[in-house]
Every structure is written in C-alpha cells, then in structure tokens.
Image (cartoon, helix red, strand yellow):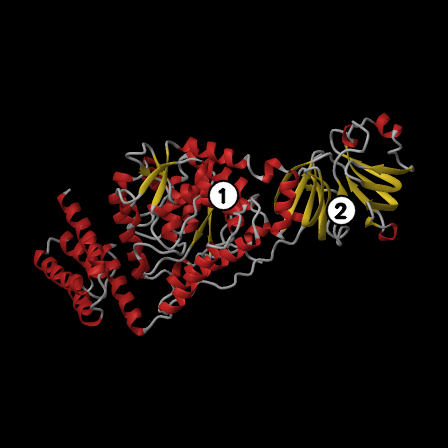
Amino acid sequence: MEPAYESNPVLDKLPVHLKQFVKPQNYENYSAVNQAVWRYVMRKNVDYLSKVAHASYLDGLKQTGISIDSIPNMYGMNRILEEIGWAAVAVDGFIPPSAFMEFQAYNVLVIASDIRQLEHIEYTPAPDIIHEGAGHAPIIANPEYAEYLRRFGEIGCKAISSARDHDMYEAIRHLSIIKEAPDTPASEIEEAEKKVDELQNNMGEPSEMALIRNLHWWTVEYGLIGPLEHPKIYGAGLLSSIGESTWCMTDNVKKLPYTIEAAYREFDITKPQPQLYVTPDFAHLSLVLEEFANTMALRTGGLSGIKKLIASGALGTAELSTGLQISGVFTDVIEHEGHPIYLQTKGKTALSYREKELVGHGTAYHAEGFGSPVGKLKGINLAIEDMSPRDLKAYNIYEGERVTLEFEGGIEVTGDIITGTRNLQGKIILISFENCTVTHGDKILFKPEWGIYDMAVGKKVVSAFSGPADTRSFDLITHVPSEGTIRRKKSEEQIALETLYQSVRDIRENREITMEVHGIFESVKANHPKDWLLSVELYELAVDKGDDAFAREILVHLDKIKAESPKIAHLIEDGVGLTDNNLVE
C-alpha cells in the first residue's frame, strides 16, 4: 500500500501504529479563499508578532520555509525541516493525546491540514494548518525548545490515562469539528459544549495524561517567555490567533510564573484563557518537565503505579527491578504492607526486556493473561535476582528440582523447575515451571492443568507506563475516528466567490488574468456584499498601483460593511492598516 505522504529519513523511523494517523495533505483542495485567509492571518501576525513574539518565531519562519503568501506545502516544508532533524505529517483534526506526543518523541510535527473558515479567521477550537504550521513549526527551529518538545513527547506518551480521558478527547474532538463545520445549528454546538463541561466537572482524580496535557497547554500551546512584567509569546495557540495574541498582552490576562503547579490548572479550549504562565527561558521548561516526570509511575513504579494501570483499563507495562517488562491489560494486584506482591493481566500479554520482546513470550503464548509474584522470599534476605548460581542451587532454585517458593506476603509457588531466562548481566529474570500451583492463602492463582507457569523475577516494580514495552508485540493499528472533519458543500455562490478570489491572487502573482480589478470589485458588491476580505485585498492592489480613486471607492464599501457588521470592523481596519502601514514604511 502506498503511504499517504512522501517519506524521508525522519519519517522512516515512525512505527507503523503512528502511520495510521497520517493522511495526504491534498494541497489542490485549498481554495483561493483558504489562501487569502492564510495570507491575512500571516501578514497580521508577522506585523504584530514581530513586536511581541520570542525572537525564535521570525527566525523560525525563515528556517522552516513557511511563506506569508501561501499555505505551506508539507512536502516542501519537510525538505527544510529535515535540516534541523524534524519532519511534519498531515492528520485529520485532533488525534489521541498519547499518539500526538509520541509523534513529538520521533521529532515529527503533526499538522491538521484543514484550514479555518473565513468566519473563524481570528480563532478556531479545531486544530488547523494556521495553528500547527504557523504556530508550532517556526519555534522548533530553536534547538533548546525543539529538544524540550521531543523530550515532552517521549515522557508524555508514557503517561497513564483514565477511561474518562478518552471520553473527554472524543467530546472535544466532536465539539471542534462541529464548531468549524459550516451551518451547524447553534443548539447542536450548545449541546456539545454542555457535554464537555459535564465531563470536565466530573473527571475525578486527574490522571497522569490529564496533568501532563495541562503542562502541554500552558507551555507549547499558550506559553509566554521572559520577564513576568514584559513577556514574549512562544505558544502556538497564541502565535496562530490574531485575537488572543493581542488579548494576552493586556492586563486582562493574569501572568503567573511557570511552575509544576500549572499541571493542576485546567483549561477551557472554547474560551480565551484568563491567565497564562511565563517561563524565564526555554531551559526552565525542561526543569519543570523533569520535576513532573519524577512524580509519574514511569519513574516511581510501585503499588500506586500498578493501580493506575488497573484504573486505566488500557494496555500498559509494568517493569520489574530485573528489567523484565510485562505488557498487557492489568486487572488485579495483591498487596501487602503497601507493596504489590502479585500482578495479574487478562487477555493478550507479552514479556519483554529493554523494549524487546522475549523469544517465545509474545501474545500468542500468553494469550489468556499473565500472573506473577513480586518481591523477596520469606525469611531470606537475598532476593532471587541477586542470587549467584551457587545461591540458587543452595535454595533448590535449579533446573529439574521441585521447589516451593514462599514469598513475603503469603504467595506460594510450588512446581518443577524447567528452565530459567537470564538478562545480559547474568541475572535471572524468568523461571518456568511445570506441574505448578500458585496460591495466596486459600486462593488458587494457578493450577497445574493450566500448563507451563512462567514466573517473573523481580523484588519490586520500578516503573509503570502506558502502552507496550515493544510496540511490535501488539496490533496497534486500531484507530478508527468516530467522525471526520465535515467538508463544506460548495454552493454556486461560493464557487463564484472563490473564482473572484483566484483572480485577485492571479493579478498579485502576475499570472494571466481573465477579469480586471474594477470588474472583480463590481461583482463582489453586487453578488457577495457581506464578504470583506476580498475587498481588503483589492484595496491593497489599488494602493500598490497608485489608483487613489479606486482605493477610496473600496474604503467606502468597507465602511458600509463595518456599519452593518460591527463585530468584524476591527478585522477590516487591521487589513486596511497593514496596507497603509506598508505604504508609509
């Protein structure tokens, strides 16, 4: 099957389960109106952001090959991004947070290739190419920030989610789709917003994924940098929103020093943010990220880590002190004095060591689940993993011996030892038994008739994280989006308007033209009286050609639109102002 994108050395490293989210950009689907929306936002942003954005933004625009005049072609972008070790792929709207972050871990920027409607030119809750391409891409040209982004992805994709996180993701995805879709009834949007609010107010204890997603929001999306009193913008959500980039610089938005406390500050994707966090520099972002990572089950393991995996109900991994990794859906844990002493998964499970599946211990072999004691033997100070070959023989933990192993906490394993598996350091990590019974008090955990019993060796759980240790162990090609972006069904009127926009674009780019500017203007006034952006573009052409009379005529028409639609008056004034300012300069 042909890939949905043009590959390169960075994209070649993507695992198959991430490639399922990639879609073709289909550049030819962008209309002249889409291109005009991009151009307006970029001209406005570059003009304003040159004063308030971090210096890396404007430098990054040049380095990443992002044009002010045209929506970026991802294939062209990739040729330039490759020089800084990154790449970009197109996706359809929001993808699951864990996948989004895992792309980052591979130095790949995901770009929602659709573009906002003219009606939502200032802001859209749906991810689009303005947000992703013009917001995220330029800043990654800064090496320190790029490394933060990669590291964030590496840690974030291991964060354990809750079942409610998935419901919230689906609710936000649905809301973003219908808010950006044309002609969605207000009642439907209201109902979707109510659903998001209900979920947000009933999430319970926030999961690791929810907390790290908050950190992502307050840095990567809505971050400010520099002195608290006079910060600059670096967050993509602000860089791509001509409304919020202005609003956030006012005293109406509270500025707070960026600390780990931001992980516990929720956000509302549908509204401007009432407060923002300011980092003194990009290096500080990584310090806070590492501080948060130290609280995650990824690094703490233990009973709480296993309980997080069980609560998630999703595929996860527990790593033991020997390095043995158990990947599956965890269902039960037996605990003793605050420690896990027996772990149990259900269904397909795989055993790995250092992210590589152990030969013979894949999901086909462990198809019905896996259970194993954890901890030390009762009355013996030396853990099995620390025993030398002589120690193992002394305690009858030896091939061909029948043995009873009694663990602290009351787990008993009785059976005939078949063999053991060792790691590269020579430590034993797995012992296989036949004729084996495993009990905890009166409870039978394994019976001889169930076959070979494979016992993991490890005195403690050192890590617990989302997803499998070896991604090749499981079929992860399961993503079926509940709904896709809704495409506008173009009316004859819309097609005619797009033709006029294309004519103006052709004139600006000195291509062969079929209609001159005065004819275009008359057609706009007669057939599309509410459209303002094309008249702003015509004003720019009139000023460039020194046709003052025509420019004044256009301004009269734009004043009429402002009077009839005061909510967009500032957009018109900003567009006209850009041309006038350029003329002065």
Quarter holding the C terminus is: top left
Query: Marks 1 and 2, Cα distance to the nearest angstrom?
Result: 30 Å
Residue position marked by numbered label 2 in the rendering? 371
Residue position marked by numbered label 1 in the rendering? 212
Residue 275 placement (x, y as % from top left): 35, 44
Residue 214 placement (x, y as % from top left): 45, 45
Asked whether 56 or 421 is in front, the reply is 421
Asked whether 411 or 27 is in front, the reply is 411
Per the rendering, the mark at residue 88 is none
Q: Residues within 10 Å of mark 2 (few under 14, many from 20)?
A: many
Q: In this rendering, would 544 be left or right of 315?
A: left
Asked whether 59 or 166 is in front, the reply is 166
Task: Identify which residue is drawn at 31% across, 74% down.
Answer: 492
Q: In this rendering, would 48 be left or right of 389?
A: left
What kind of element bears circle 1? helix
Q: Residues within 10 Å of mark 1 (few under 14, many from 20)?
A: many
Q: Is residue 471 visible?
A: no
Name the residue type under label 1.
Ile
Up the image or down, 251 lies above or below 487; here it is above
Up the image or down, 345 lies above or below 352; here it is below
Task: Identify which residue is drawn at 68% across, 46% down.
Answer: 327
Disc with the residue nearer the chain's start (1 vs 2): 1
Q: Quadrant of residue 525?
A: bottom left
Q: In this rendering, would 248 be left or right of 4?
A: left
Residue 308 placement (x, y as % from top left): 61, 46
Q: Residue furthest bottom?
A: 492
Q: Is residue 562 visible?
A: yes
Residue 549 placement (x, y as % from top left): 7, 59
Name the residue type under label 2.
Gly
Q: Quadrant of residue 494?
A: bottom left
Task: Identify which residue is drawn at 28% across, 34% down.
Answer: 229
